[in-house]
Amino acid sequence: MHPALVSSAARAPATPAPGWRSRLPAMVGLAPWGLAVLADWAADHAGSLRGTATWQFVGMAAAVAGLVGIAVCLWRLGGGRGMLPRAVLGVLLAIGLGTAGPSSAQRAAEIGRIAFGLDPLPAARVELSGDGRTLWLRGAIGTGSADAVARALGAASGVRLVRLDSPGGRVYEAREIAELLRARRVDTFAEGLCASACTVVLLAGRERGAAEQARIGFHRPQFAGQDDEALGTSHALIRAYRDAGLGTAFIDRVRATPSRSMWYPARAELLRQRVLTG
């Protein structure tokens, strides 16, 4: 072989085999989205409010990591110099920041507080009467309220009536309590205020009553950082009212009442809708 060819071949750099480092940007970009999908599924099957909030928080964090991962991929694709990757990267970041904003931060903070056991709404006060036939539920229906009701019902098989005095709270907890009461076929009675999520518990009674001075209030659901008009269309509170058989016109009035307000239907309307049975 000619000496010039030998020296030329010796100086040609060998093509490196692709290794894990070359695939790292793609791994960084795609893995968080897989985790976000898994977290979304786990949140739907968590079995508790705190568990659901924990997985939702993980999913939100994974989505943010995924956005960062895409940015890394695009930057590496253009070697940090290509105009097209930079332009796409800028658009993605703008969309991400615009979608997030203060409202998403508020929602994440609220979910985080629940996930880490710092729910600002305390668990309801659950007490049994001396004869063990009446269960009282008082105060906000915060995280852990359904567990408290379950423990009380488990300790007193003779409970036949649940008396309510609550401004509402977490709809998830209210629906869990409602399932417990329906399973026991107990009656419910609004003793004082029964508003918002408390009405879900009231509607779970086999027979449902209210004191003359009781106030039973309805409004659109709300959650920190989320638009209550959007929530009023598909939120679990509205679904619970549909499941209870409330009329379309009644539910429309609930959806038309902002979360910062409260609608107290007349007793005749409550009887007509069978919110109360007597």
Image: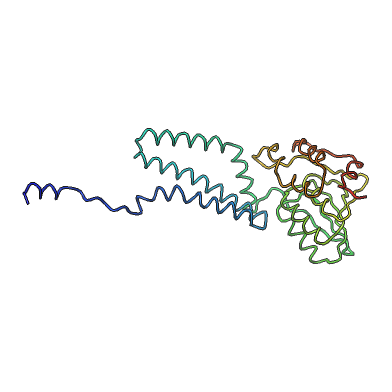
Colour treatment of the image: rainbow
Q: Nearer the viewer, residue 248 or 101?
A: 248
Going by the picture, which residue comes out furthest to the front?
1
Q: Position of residue 203 (x, y in %)?
A: 83, 51
- Give me the residue at 61% from left, 49% from top: 112
Image mark count: 0
Q: Is residue 159 left or right of residue 173?
A: right
Which residue shows up at 75% across the image and 44% down it? 238
Tell whether 247 sits left or right of 82: right
Image coordinates for residue 9, horizontal then vertical, percent: 14, 49
In the image, 165 versus 69, the foreground residue is: 69
From what the image shows, is residue 109 above or below residue 137?
above
In the image, farthest residue toward the left: 2
Residue 226 rendering spot, x and y as whole percentages: 65, 39
The location of residue 190, given as percent across then percent down, is 87, 49
Asked whether 1 or 83 is in front, the reply is 1
Vertically, is 248 above or below 30? above
